[in-house]
Amino acid sequence: MPTASRPPPMYTLFPKLRPLLSHSPSLFTAPFRRRRQSLAFSALPTKTKAIDAALMKEKWLESLTLPSPEEHVLNTESSYVIGVDPDLSGALALLKINHLSGSSEAQVFDTPHLPVLVGNRVRKRLDAKSIVQLIRSLDIPSGSTAYIEQSTPYPKDGKQGWYSGGFGFGFWLGTLVTSGFSVVPVSSALWKRHFQLAGGNSTKDDSRRVASELFPLLSSQLKRKKDHGRAEALLIAAYGETIKSSKLVITPEEFVSEVCCLES
């Protein structure tokens, strides 16, 4: 008569682990602990929340800087600013500012992508290798600042839109940091408001118009409707250059004073 096979080791070990598990903190309580922490933060006084929010933002921006600011070797003659629209139809823009002559040069490059079969449909996906090669070919000094539009999901975008938006933002973020740049995420509302493009009446055609006015030498590359990614990358870079000389993160005390002024 054949002997019964022994159960897998994981089953034989479970009775021995059960007493330990019963006296250990449950892993499934973590979401509830996080929830209580979230409620506790929302219950904090306004000034305390403002300080915490400012410190968290400052720490986040520090984590997006490689190498550290102390290691940057500043070039007083010229500087580079990168602007990235991380969408699949987006682009990378590069501004080179000559501080001696007061002139600037601009370049813009479409985001490399390739077709990928997803289920029964062919979809566009970022070409990671080509993006890295593009960044390396530009020979941008380490420590330069890159401004990237922060991904904001909208209900109308659907699951595919949420996936591609989040993936693109995360990919560009990691690639730029590991390439030695200081990365500053900016919301679309910020840079669009700066160029008076915010609001429901503004379209991507308006972005192309404003970019063509700011960069007339590149207007031939912004003629088509599908060139809106190039235009927005250029505008993000231009917005970054305008705020580059000012402080990117205000101190917690300044943040608190601004909140108090808004509430009064």
Image: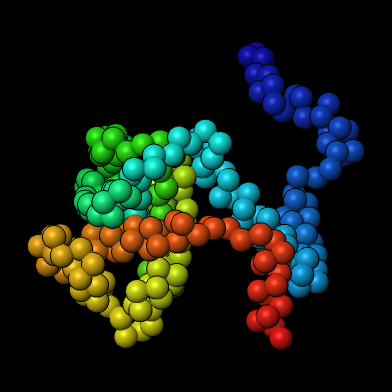
Front residue of 153 and 60: 60
Q: Is residue 128 above or below residue 40?
A: above
In this view, 88 is above or below 127 = below
Q: In which quarter of the image is residue 237?
A: bottom left
Q: Residue 41 at x, y = what percent?
A: 76, 64
Question: Residue 232's x, y, as percent?
Answer: 29, 64
- Residue 250 x/y as whole percent: 61, 61
Viewer-closest of 97 and 181: 97
> To which quarter of the image does residue 150 belong?
bottom left
Looking at the image, which is closer to me, 213 or 187? 213
Residue 246 appears at what percent x and percent y?
Answer: 50, 59
| Quadrant of the rendering where the N terminus is positioned | top right
Residue at 76% of width from left, 24% of height from top? 13
Q: Residue at x 13, y 60 (%)?
A: 217
34 horizontally vs 112: left or right:
right
Count of numbered circles on the image = 0
Instruction: Say whether residue 65 is visible.
Output: yes
Residue at 90% x, 38% y is 23
Lateral position of residue 135 relative to residue 218, left or right: right
**Residue 88 visible to an observer of this rendering:** no
- Residue nearest the viewer, comparing 46 with 211: 211
- Outermost residue on the front side: it is 100
Residue furthest to the left in view is 220
Q: In which quarter of the image is the C terminus?
A: bottom right
| Image coloring type | rainbow
